[in-house]
Amino acid sequence: MTHSAHMHPDDIRSQFSAAMSVMYKKEVPLYGVLLDLVADVNEATLRRRPDLQADFERTGELSRISLERHGAIRVGSPEELHTLRRLFAIMGMAPVGYYDLSVAGMPVHSTAFRPITDASLTHNPFRVFTSLLRVDLITDEALRSEVAAILSRRNIFTPGALRLIERAEQEGGLTPGEADLFVSEALETFRWHGQASVNAETYERLSATHRLIADIVSFRGPHINHLTPRTLDIDTVQKEMPARGVSPKDVIEGPPPRACPILLRQTSFKALDEPISFPATDGTLEKGVHTARFGEIEQRGVALTRKGRALYDRLLADVREKGGSGSTASDYPTRLAEVFRDFPDDYDDIRQQGLGYFRYTPTDETITEDVTTMPPEALVERGYAIATPIIYEDFLPVSAAGIFQSNLGGQERRSYAANANREMFANALGADLIDEFDLYDAAQARSVEATKASLNERSS
Ligand code: OOG
Ligand code: NI
């Protein structure tokens, strides 16, 4: 079989992301309500802001806005994570970044499976925030081995999915027919199961240790727990949610509202109480309730350099220290806005101070000089190039912790000593985690090179 007979991983990802969205809309109808609201607000925002529309058209961003979403899942064992990596690879998704959630009292660590090239991100940026249970953080030894035993008995992938993963690895891809089958088999892993695989007593015990542990361990698979569309105006969506029957969490995570959005702002609606059943020893089913699945929206802004991110982290820590109790207090938005006055809110300042990443494109300006050694800032100054913000494609650990907490009922705050274990995660994955800053550095550098090449060609 020739390589061209294979479906492009970007197209398999698009198909999978669309299928996942259809499935989740059926499973959690409020997600559909949120999608409609976000589409309405995005349309109104673009009508109100022709400048934004023009920017998006120039960068190719416009076509992906309505497609854009991320999801999240939580798995229990290293083997599950390992197979997930192989499954996501077929859709052109690689593990980027390491997020230690133990600092926020969650016994998990995470990565984001996502496309990494400019072209693939423009095609469809679908990403999955994927968490792995830290069995090592369960202190009760008996419970720890019970959890391991339960997890070892389940297989979260269908035989068909496993067969197609192997086929894709051997053949270097899947034909369109195989890809169709792969998408429907892969979807099964993320489907909701209303019947727990453990009995009610075990579920209660797991839940009493940590509600997240009960969610990860008690079911046949790692149900997708939310899908998140991207909005161009998160404050408006947050305000309009109640009118559409959706009740949002109290505050928006991330930076305050700004003229020049940075990184990522997120908010969610609370997890639903969903009826489930437990197998009883006499073969009957016992009724129960599980809260895990929710909806989330996000607004994305410019990706920050290491220097910009250090400033962001310092300011956020200041806000949280001043208020004592994180992002739930009612004066939080005011404090946040005040402290973030120290973060420049102008793209030229952000760029000139090396706080953010930008993509350079050539203008039509007449040019008679060689620009090979010219710094990018000089290209902009002389009108040879325009710099457009590179959008942040990743996640924020403090925001993620806020989303986790809000959806575990708010009271789930255990304290674990901060003990990131990136190596343990990478070993389970069977691959290195890609550093997000390397990706943004490379994207920016590539755009500078391409701009210079095109300018030099015109000047000679
Ligand atoms: C993941 C929560 C984090 C985000 O967008 O930061 C998250 C989870 O609840 O499994 O989705
Ligand atoms: Ni999320």
Image (cartoon, rainbow, N blue to C red):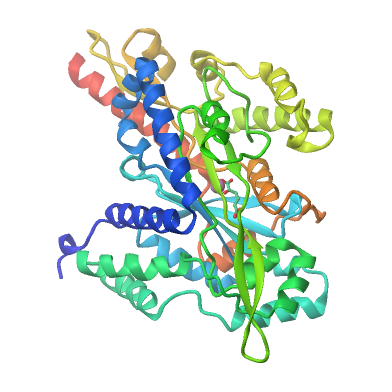
Image position of 285 (left or right of 361)? right
Task: Work out which quarter of the rendered image holds the N terminus and state it.
Answer: bottom left
In terms of image quadrants, where is residue 245? Answer: top right
Q: 89 left or right of 393?
A: left
Give the percent coordinates (x, y) of residue 44. Answer: 39, 23
Q: Is residue 456 above or below residue 38?
A: above
Residue 454 falls left or right of residue 387: left
Nearer the observer, 14 or 110: 14
Viewer can see residue 264: no
Q: Is residue 376 visible?
A: yes
The answer to whether 291 is drawn above or below residue 319 in the figure is below
Q: How many marks?
A: 0
Camera-nearest residue between 177 and 313: 177
Residue shown at the point (39%, 61%) measured from the top left: 89
- Residue closer to the observer: 440 or 174: 174
Q: Quadrant of residue 117?
A: top left
Horizontal and vertical percent for residue 279? 63, 83
Instruction: Quarter of the image for the C terminus: give it.
Output: top left
**Residue 13 vs residue 28: left or right?**
left
In this view, the residue farthest toward the bottom is 282
Residue at screen point 56% across, 27% down:
235
Q: Relative to 169, is 114 above or below?
A: above
Image position, residue 35 (x, y; %) = 43, 41
Examine the rendered structure and indicate whether residue 246 appears above or below residue 453. Answer: below
Q: Position of residue 356 (x, y in %)?
A: 52, 26
Q: Residue at x 69, y 52 (%)?
A: 101
